[in-house]
Amino acid sequence: MLDVTSVELRRAEHFGRIRYASTDRAPEIWRQLSRVLRAGTGVQARSGGEGVSQPLADLHLDWPDVQPVTIHRVGEAFTSWQARLTEAGRVRLFHPALLRRRDVAFRLRERLSTVVGCDKVGVNTFLGELSVRFRPEVIALEQVVRELERAWDYVLHGADAPLQRGRLLAASSLLGVAYAGQFLVPALRPVAMLGVALYGLPNVIATLRELRELKVGLPALYATGLVLTLLRGLPFHTSVMALLLQIWPRLAFLAFTRSQRRLFGPIRRRVLAVRVIGDDGKPALRDISAVQPGDLIIVGEGEIVPVDGTVAEGHATVDETVLTGRPSLADAVRGTRVLAATEILSGEIRIRVERVGAGTVSATIAAGLPTTHFSGLPSAASAEHIATRNARPALALGFASLLLTRQIRPAQVLLRPDFATEPRLAAQLGALHDVAAGLLSGIFFRTPAAIDRLAVADVLIFDDSVGIDRRRLEVADVVCAGSLAPDALLALAAAGFGAEAGEAGEALQRACAERDVAPDPAEKLSRTAGLARFRAADGAWVEVATAERAVDAGWRLPASLLAPKPASPRTGRRRAEQAGDAEHRLVVRRAGVVAGAVTLLPRGDLLATTVIAALRTRRPDARIVYLSSRAQAQAETAANRVGISMVHGGLRDEEKAAVVATYGARTVFVGDGASLRCAGAMAEAMVSVSVGGLGSVPTDVADVVLLHGGLPQLPALWQIGAGHRARIDTDYRAIYAANLSAVAGALVAGLGSFEVGLASNATTAVLLARHWARLAALQAAAGVPGSPVAGGEPAFGPEGFDVPDLPGLDLPGFDLPEAPDSPEAFDAADGDGGGE
């Protein structure tokens, strides 16, 4: 209804009001209303036309009956938001659901921050106002409000939320009252003591519950500290410790949420409107929610690909760095698969849609990335287990000291060290760093707990689906069609197709290094789909193109360059994207004349040989096993070539699963996670790793997916797990050393538990700052805009992660137990500090 300005519904009162401007079309408005009411819930949304797409389909009306709902119209979209466009590219929106709802505000920011074209989002929960800065040339206001309507289910009921501020405010208020009562106004001391008692009451209740179950843990430690505090009558010191216990989780939560937004923002990018080719062959702007598989869309230079699909027409250069984690340019031509979240650097293509929305590769990866915390981390569960275990001897020593010395101070000193806060928070920050670093290296942790489990794995099992006989691409032939020498032709080809061009570029660089040939210096290098153009050192313009691109461009190729390519050896790979057995031919044209061609074939070393050698170097005690459906003799021959001696051949799929089970609970199974044939074996392993590559992510069942496909990333994955365990061990050493030293120093020097608590919290601050610095360094290495400056070693390098060889801290109980889901992973322990 184009003349209607707003609609108000009060369902509890069975009342509705329609507002419309002065018009001579009032009868038509009522006729349309009549048709809608007669249709009941079967309202048919309009579709088609420039900028028009389902104006009613996204409208959210599932509000409480007692709350009036006012519907407004923005363009062709209907919304419960009241919008006011303050200037071009800036809008203020009001909604009563925002009032005093910090959790709603948090989820709104998370949702809108992923939309391409929305640059800044501000929320005022006191006024119920949302402020959005957007780029009108990229996204229209109508699309913004449609997205807000679609987001209501997540915004109102999502699990992501900021930490509650109740205990932080209570601890802050208590600190002021305690200071005044202890040092300024003695009459306030009883009030401060009562506040301390009430603040620590939850620990007393938790202790009583544990005692009924014959358990003793952290609540008992904190409750005992509370009793000793009340006996000494010094509330200020306890209030300081209580406040610090609230500050550290909030600082860690802030570091976590800000870092994940910066690190994972690119892969979460979502395009809300696309150009769809209609039946008449003309493009029309359509909302992404109306795009279906089989549709034909247009994506041009500078745009983000919104869907997964196949190029039907055109050619373009696509930047896939956001998905591969490394500088990666791909040539998109007819028949090429393109993925959502990648960017078109040049050219224009028409894409036949295959997957859209939550079914795309990028959306699947984004759904597996954290927003506020990780659930089910074994290292987090272990931190709680160790802290609980330490509470028992601490309580025993404290009571023994109290009985022997008849003094409260030594008992408080023994109870004061904090062994729980830093490990709990470090488990979250460390896992975030490693998940992000893995993604930047092309490793997707579908199950983040796999990071902890990798460190304790001692058996690595390869399935024959990984293709251990795959060979590295190498330069097989250099054919000259002019006066250039072969080495000079190779140098020109390597200048146009560098290492960022993928495996072919890497092969060219290796060939230059082996022949001691320096790639020609390339000036004004530009790349389009399958074609690189630059100016050589002698001033001549050089073009390097794939054979297909050269033919399409109309180059006159000599007959010698059109000869059939020699057949390549079979690699045993079934997937085209993993095969690595395709021949590559690059044609070089200099000053408008074809100078020759370079042919590349998979004839190099076996890739698995290097991988197995690297794994044995990192874990010499680990057993490496090969499972194959081929006959035992054939399987042994293939495995021995890459350095594997433990071989099981002639196995059916169910027999592979049984063999995996016989190797115990600490196994890592490497196979094709997108194949049902590997599902049983992966279910039996502690950690499953898939070599399926990017295309398999939506259907892959493995805990970890190697996005580049193949085995070369496996040593980096193994090292991520080792590095994670090494940092946990280092943190525990620091915590134990600092806390035990503080206790010993206090007992010898006659200091109180307040000084011990300050030393313990200072250690927590230093270790958390180190984790924050590592996250900052990772953001800087990833080139994240606005990332904080951080010093220290780079988070990762070309050879993977540089993890020091640290011996494990052999703490009893640190056996990576399964952790239950913890929606409050950053919440502080409810300790009262137990200060002197």
Image (cartoon, grey):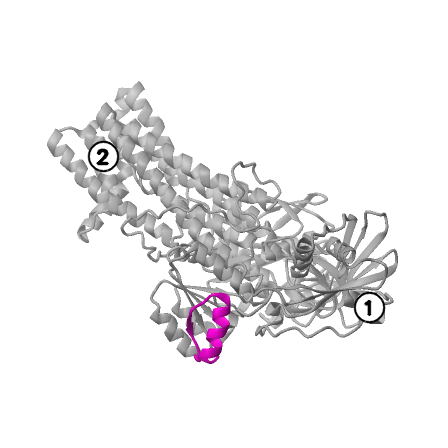
Q: Nearer the viewer, residue 207 or 626?
A: 626
Residue 620 percent coordinates (x, y): 40, 57
Q: Which quadrant of the figure has residue 568? A: bottom right
Q: Earlier in the sequence, mark 1 or mark 2?
A: 2
- Is residue 226 depicted above or below 657 in this figure? above
Q: Nearer the viewer, residue 672 or 517?
A: 517
Q: Identify which amino acid the numbered label 1 is placed on.
A: Val
Q: Which quadrant of the figure has residue 75? A: bottom right
Q: Is residue 266 left or right of residue 178?
A: right
Label 1 CA crowd tier, 10 Å (few <14, some 14–19, many 20+): few
> Regarding mark 1 in the picture, which secondary structure is present there?
helix
Q: Residue at x 29, y 28 (%)?
A: 754
> Regarding mark 2 in the picture, which secondary structure is present there?
helix
- Is residue 792 depicted above or below 698 in this figure? above
Q: Is residue 701 visible?
A: yes
Q: Which residue is mark 1?
A: 551
Q: Is residue 576 left or right of residue 729?
A: right
Residue 60 percent coordinates (x, y): 56, 59
Q: Residue at x 35, y 29 (%)?
A: 175
Between marks 1 and 2 in the image, the one whose residue lies nearer the viewer: 1
Q: Residue at x 48, y 59 (%)?
A: 613
Residue 489 percent coordinates (x, y): 78, 57
Which region is colored magenta? 629-652
Callout count: 2
- Is residue 384 depicted above or below 611 in this figure? above
Q: Nearer the viewer, residue 764 or 246?
A: 764
Residue 673 magenta-highlighted: no
Q: Which mark is residue 414?
A: 2
Q: Please say if the residues under marks 1 and 2 sit with CB atoms less than 8 Å apart.
A: no
Q: Which quadrant of the figure has residue 312? A: bottom right
